[in-house]
Amino acid sequence: MSGLLDAILSASNGNVVDQLAKQFNTNPTQTRDALSQLTQVLGRGISSNTSSADGLGGLLEALQRGNHAKYLDQPDVLTQPEARMDGNAILGHVLGSKDVSRNVASRVGGNTGIDPAIIKQMLPVAATLVMGMLSKQQQRGALPQRGDAAAPGASPLSAMLDSNRDGSIADDLLNLAGRFLR
């Protein structure tokens, strides 16, 4: 997942961490650490959700429908209510429940020294950043389109993308996207 984090951190000339630190009144080092941990959690959630044909199809459809790339292109929009609403919707799909989000916030807060209440507010923003990065990669053709990967593991494309042969292309897509942005 470090490729995913690196891609997010390098977006907008590296202004994402500064924007988040300012938005949540945290120092940049803590913010980067929190974003690193949140990105890992979200990446695992996406990987788990996309292990089925429906989950992968839903992700690809969401990437095509939404305008998530704007969160990386214009980090100042991360402060708008729309970003929080988008992020909460993403979290609902990726993590499933508010209890999981609370547990993540508590754990990341304990690891970084940031109040878990702040991490809870940061979590939807991190989700929009992850989707934004994936959206940018799909727009560039680095990720399949909705019809390309309807059945993970079943299509030649899926077999080609599953470089570690674990039966899921989600982790491979995230790694590919991260490498593409480096």
Image (cartoon, grey):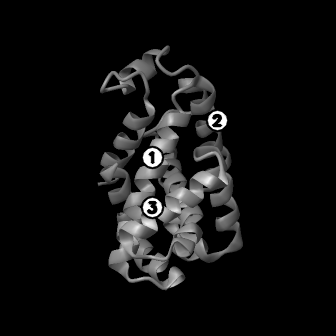
User: 13 left or right of 122?
Assistant: left
- 119, 12: nearer the viewer: 119
**What's under tag 3, amino acid-wise?**
Arg
Of the two numbered discs 1 and 2 on the same chain, state the one appearing first in sequence. Answer: 1
Image mark for residue 58: 2
Whether 8 is drawn above or below 138: the answer is below
Disc 3 residue crowd, few under 14, some 14–19, many 20+, Cα 10 Å: some
The picture places residue 81, in percent across and down from the top left corner, at: 70, 72
**Helix, strand or loop at mark 3:** helix
Of circles 1 and 2, which is in front?
A: 1
Whether 71 is drawn above or below 164: the answer is below
Residue at (47% x, 79% y) in the render? 19
For disc 1, the marked residue is: 43
For disc 3, the marked residue is: 107
The picture places residue 71, in percent across and down from the top left corner, at: 55, 64
**Helix, strand or loop at mark 2:** helix
Quadrant assignment, res 110:
bottom left
